[in-house]
Amino acid sequence: MPFYRSIRSRRVRRKPKELDLQLTSMMDVMVIILVFLLKTYSASNHNFSTLPGMKLPTSGSPDVPADSLHLIITPEAITFENQRIVEFVQTAASLGDTEGGYSFKTIDLREDGRQIVPLYDALVRAREKAELLRAKSRARDAQGNPLPFDGVLAIQADKRVQYDTIRRIMYTSATAGYKVFRLLALRKEI
């Protein structure tokens, strides 16, 4: 008889009760959704912004520029990483001219006017800083050497900037060790 009572008492305890909400399962689902959203969300560290009054060319390319050093060229000056490097001399032709006339100071040029000295110095300092940071970094190549300097420069030039100026800037950048140039433009709305 005692055996019979224990089975009966177990059956009485197993009667279905009111169901409670299982928060553990809900939290697991929320964590999985959160991880999925974080993995699919992509953001860039660099936010390339334009200066007031700057007229950029447009492009239909959907590509987003990669992180790199930023060079801005306007008819007034050259700015590298938010620091004004070279101030242009406004010519007499620029008065009342919508295209703007400007030239370099003679002390800012060398190598028969092909290289811009203050820009070269700023680019070399930036390259040396990047190489020092890469040497201290734990990221290494297959042989255990620090990763090489990638030499990427994003150039944002006003439409009014002359081709000769851009050519001088690219020559100066190449002599400073920069091999890849990304010319930034506004995305054309389709």
Image (spheres, grey):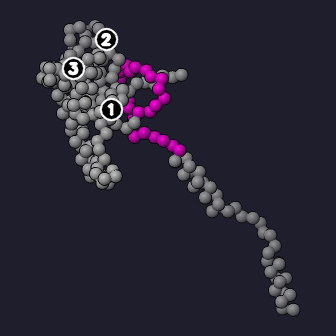
Is residue 11 placed above or below 138 in the rendered structure?
below
Bounds of the magenta span?
40-65
Binning the other alpha carbons within 10 Å of mark 2 as few (below 14), some (14 to 19) or many (20 upward) gives some
Q: Mark 2 belongs to which amino acid?
A: Glu
Query: Which residue does the image show at 40% across and 24% down from the upper left?
Result: 185
Q: Identify the amino acid type marked 1.
A: Val
Question: In terms of sequence position, does the residue under pointer 1 or pointer 2 come before the other?
Answer: 2
Residue 106: image quadrant is top left
Instruction: Give SS at disc 2.
Output: loop
Return the x and y of residue 171 as percentages of the image width and height. 24, 26
Which mark is drawn over residue 88? 3
Q: Spatial distance from mark 2 to mark 3, Cα to Cα?
A: 14 Å
Residue 22 in sight: yes
Name the residue beneath numbered marker 1: 180
Secondary structure state at the residue bearing disc 1: strand
Local crowd size for mark 3, using a 10 Å CA cut-off: few (<14), some (14–19), many (≥20): some
The answer to whether residue 171 is magenta is: no
| Residue 85 appears anywhere in the view | no
Residue 63 included in the magenta stretch of the image:
yes
Mark 3 and mark 2 in contact (Cβ < 8 Å)? no
Label 1 neighbour load within 10 Å: few <14, some 14-19, many 20+:
some
Residue extending furthest toward the bottom: 1
Principal secondary structure, stretch drawn in magenta: loop
Q: Position of residue 157 (x, y in %)?
A: 33, 23
Mark pair 1, 2: CA separation: 28 Å
Task: Tell me if residue 39 comes above or below residue 6 in the rendering.
Answer: above
Residue drawn at 31 percent across, 11 percent down: 99
Tell me which residue sits at (20%, 12%) in the image: 91
Could you tell me which residue is drawn at 27 percent across and 34 percent down? 178
The Cα atoms of the two marked residues, 3 and 1, are separated by: 25 Å
Task: Identify residue type, mark 3.
Answer: Phe
- Residue at mark 2: 99
